[in-house]
Image (cartoon, rainbow, N blue to C red):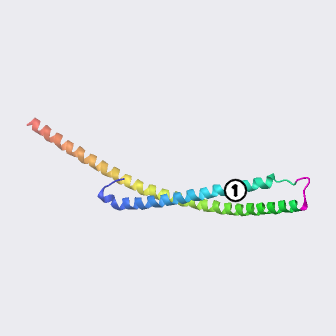
């Protein structure tokens, strides 16, 4: 980053944009982690429901207990699906926000780079002009 005094205000903007980009990236990572945990939980509940079977010989109490357990697992699976759908929406919003913050940061950094390149070009032109002047003076001394 340029330490040029004319770029101090833009450097401050870059610092703010970096913080915002970092915050939005961390938020996105948290949402994605929550989404992964919910997906794992839903897979587990779905596996329990899919793997359950009714034994050939069972007591009425055992059947009622199994039915209650499976009903609870089914309700949890439904709630988990709803939570997962919500986190998908939140993740999409977080991804969009992070992308926008990243683009804003890149734009300001690009502007700083352009300013620095412009200053380097001007410095090179000044040096070339000074070198030409020195060469002309040396040539003029030699022709006298």
Among all residues in the image, which is located at the extreme right?
A: 57
40 to the left or right of 125: right
Residue 31 x, y percent position in the rendering: 59, 59
Residue 94 quadrant: bottom right
Residue visible at 52% across and 60% down in the picture: 24
> What residue is at 11 percent from the left and 35 percent from the top?
142
Residue 57 lies in the magenta stretch: yes
The C terminus lies in which quarter of the figure?
Answer: top left
Q: Is residue 140 visible?
A: yes
In magenta, the rendered stretch is 55-60
Circle 1 is placed at which residue position? 41
Secondary structure at numbered mark 1: helix
> Where does residue 67 sit, x and y in percent of width and height?
84, 61
At 32% from the left and 55% from the top, the residue drawn is 3
Magenta portion: prevailing SS class? loop
Q: Is residue 136 magenta?
A: no
């Amino acid at each position: 980053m340029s330490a040029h005094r004319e770029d101090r205000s833009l450097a401050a903007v870059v610092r703010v944009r970096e913080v915002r980009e970092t915050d939005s990236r961390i938020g996105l990572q948290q949402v994605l982690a929550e989404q992964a945990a919910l997906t794992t939980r839903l897979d587990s509940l779905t596996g329990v429901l899919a793997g359950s079977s009714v034994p050939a010989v069972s007591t009425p109490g055992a059947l009622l207990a199994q039915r209650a357990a499976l009903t609870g697992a089914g309700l949890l699976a439904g709630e988990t699906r709803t939570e997962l759908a919500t986190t998908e929406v939140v993740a999409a919003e977080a991804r969009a926000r992070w992308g926008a913050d990243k683009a804003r940061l890149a734009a300001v950094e690009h502007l700083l780079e352009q300013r620095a390149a412009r200053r380097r070009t001007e410095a090179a032109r000044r040096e070339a002009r000074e070198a030409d002047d020195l060469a002309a003076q040396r040539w003029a001394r030699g022709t006298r």
